[in-house]
Image: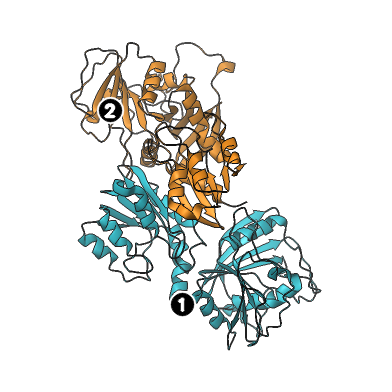
Chain colours: A cyan, B orange
Amino acid sequence: MSNFMQYAIQLAQMVEGQTGVNPPVGSVVVNDGRIVGLGAHLMQGDKHAEVQALDMAQDKAKGGTIYISLEPCTHYGSTPPCVNKIIEFGLSKVIYAVKDTTLPSEGNAILQKAGIEVEYQHSTEAAQLYEDFFKAKNNKVPEITVKVSTTLDGKQATDNGQSQWITNPEVKQDVYRLRHTHDAVLTGYGTVEADNPRYTTCIQDGKHPTRIILSRKGDIDFSKQIFHDNLSEIWIYTEHESLTSPNEHIKIIHLADCKLDNILTDIYERGVGKLLIEAGPRVTSAFLQSKYLDQLIIYYAPKIIGGRGIHQFYQTDHVIDLDQATQFEIISTELINQNIKMIMRKK
Amino acid sequence: MSNFMQYAIQLAQMVEGQTGVNPPVGSVVVNDGRIVGLGAHLMQGDKHAEVQALDMAQDKAKGGTIYISLEPCTHYGSTPPCVNKIIEFGLSKVIYAVKDTTLPSEGNAILQKAGIEVEYQHSTEAAQLYEDFFKAKNNKVPEITVKVSTTLDGKQATDNGQSQWITNPEVKQDVYRLRHTHDAVLTGYGTVEADNPRYTTCIQDGKHPTRIILSRKGDIDFSKQIFHDNLSEIWIYTEHESLTSPNEHIKIIHLADCKLDNILTDIYERGVGKLLIEAGPRVTSAFLQSKYLDQLIIYYAPKIIGGRGIHQFYQTDHVIDLDQATQFEIISTELINQNIKMIMRKK
């Protein structure tokens, strides 16, 4: 087994979080045992990975093999179908890791009719990369990751609301990376009021996510820190019809009913493919109960704070039977300077 | 810390073994938090990594940062200096992981004079990637890896010469990957005669190394299997002045004195940057004693075969004092289906 498919998947991983509602895709063109072209889909509306790689390879692509992390597209979207380009460049073989279930699937037939061999080379890593993308595209809502920083006894703050800082500075750095790889961060206005956060990233050359604030009532104090910078747009979802924006980069989005499904559908339509939830107990709990939840990331600080538990991160109105409790699969655990990071997927 | 430098290094690793006497280099251009260009140096004589990445980025590079695994070049070689291209594209910052000690080092000054910030971001992984390259370039001999498949008691074959197969089929696959990532494989004619090997690779879309055979006497039986295919060139080093080639892809290289240094210098001049030694005890021992040895990879099969030890992989003419014994640093150990792979570097 060669490593070329692995390289295509690595290229896809490099652009995770910068392709909006498009999938992150990587591609490698190989001819005569050498890589002659490399590519990734860099941005929605921009060239697809295959096209980038073929443009790099030019006439060296002829007779070669193209490795792609995802099945090449067959449709006219914002760019022409990749299968046409593959045929035009005279490739002899196409190998892809994941079938794109959201496309009409005549791609193989088109390629084979043009005399191009097609091979499907399964990769668990690539399948995971696209699992949430397919679900999101079908549901027309973003991929959703809920991030929680908590004590061992499940609290985001003491009963007095003291929460800065439960986790350590290294966790903060890790959260910056999370923000960089998501198109947008969502929180409730209560958290903006209580913690005065900014939701930007501080990693070198990092991308600031769009910041989304839910405020049904629309009773906003625009002197809060988050409104001071225009590093990225701020979208405020509200039912308050006469709320207006003090600044161009702050968009007020009025919805007649600010229920989660309506908000998520609207967010997706505006181009957000990956959404990170960093919120207080109320919004966090709402998303943890949502059928659209994909991933849960918990950072545990090795502390217990007790109290009545006003700020337990998961609270529901009704009692849930134990056999109805939401189950997760643990994907990874990592020790970050005495804090524990757990990445989980909803089962 | 962002991951962009890590991505540049990954790109460099993807093209390891296909850049001849040039270093494998990767590059990522970032602007406004997004990757806007990706590149790698694909082949000697081809565009450098920076140029590939900038060509992909086009006008999106302006004001951005370029991450490069190795310091950008300042000289006219087969392509113009990369620093010129970086200035021309209007980058605001250059970050590289390893200083190129083989170049005149005014690169930083040229960039800074053009108003471009330069940052050096050390990476142990990248330093390791170029360590042998610098040494090889200075000595004008290839980077040398000796590969040995042996029993636990240090023998490549029984006293009767039986050696197929000491290690298992999974090790064979691993050796195919080694061949793919080296420009050439070198052996002695004795091994060709005894084992009748081909020294090609069988990984999908793999690159067959140039095959180099040492035969001082030049007493060659061209009916051996290795001469049957022309998947890659075969170079025969000999002192036999009237030996001629039966076939275009077989080159006879006459040297007045077939000593190791002469051979290695000639191999490097012909464009081989990375050389893998897969040979019997005599040639293996010669390379293990050479000052040019960089890396030793041993595959141990969990067997002991005893006998007199005619085919012990390391044999020397004189007794070596224990405190003069060659020492290695173990880089990694890996279990390959009950065989052990050890990668070591000469201390």
User: Mark 2, residues whose alpha carbon is within 10 Å: few (<14), some, or many (≥20)?
Assistant: many
Q: Number of numbered discs present?
A: 2
Could you give the CA–CA distance between mark 2 and mark 1, rounded to whole angstroms? 58 Å
Name the amino acid type tagged 2.
Ile
- The local secondary structure at tag 2 comes to strand
Residue, disc 2: B234
The image shows residue A195 at horizontal and vertical percentages of: 74, 70
- The local secondary structure at tag 1 comes to helix
Q: Is residue B73 above or below residue A200?
A: above
Q: Is residue A161 above or below residue B136?
A: below
Name the amino acid type tagged 1.
Asn
The answer to whether marks 2 and 1 sit on the same chain is no
> Measuring 32% from the left and 11% from the top, which residue is drawn there?
B256
Q: Does residue B217 appear left or right of residue A43 in this picture?
A: left
Quarter of image, res B325: top right
Q: Is residue A175 above or below residue B46?
A: below
> Measuring 74% from the left and 72% from the top, which residue is drawn there?
A224
The image shows residue A163 at horizontal and vertical percentages of: 76, 67
Q: Is residue A1 visible?
A: no
The image shows residue A5 at horizontal and vertical percentages of: 39, 52
Residue, disc 1: A139
Subunit that carries the residue with mark 1? A
Q: Nearer the viewer, residue A252 or A132?
A: A252
> Measuring 20% from the left and 18% from the top, which residue is drawn there?
B244
Q: Nearer the viewer, residue A323 or A4?
A: A4
Q: Nearer the viewer, residue A192 or B52?
A: B52
Quarter of image, res A319: bottom right
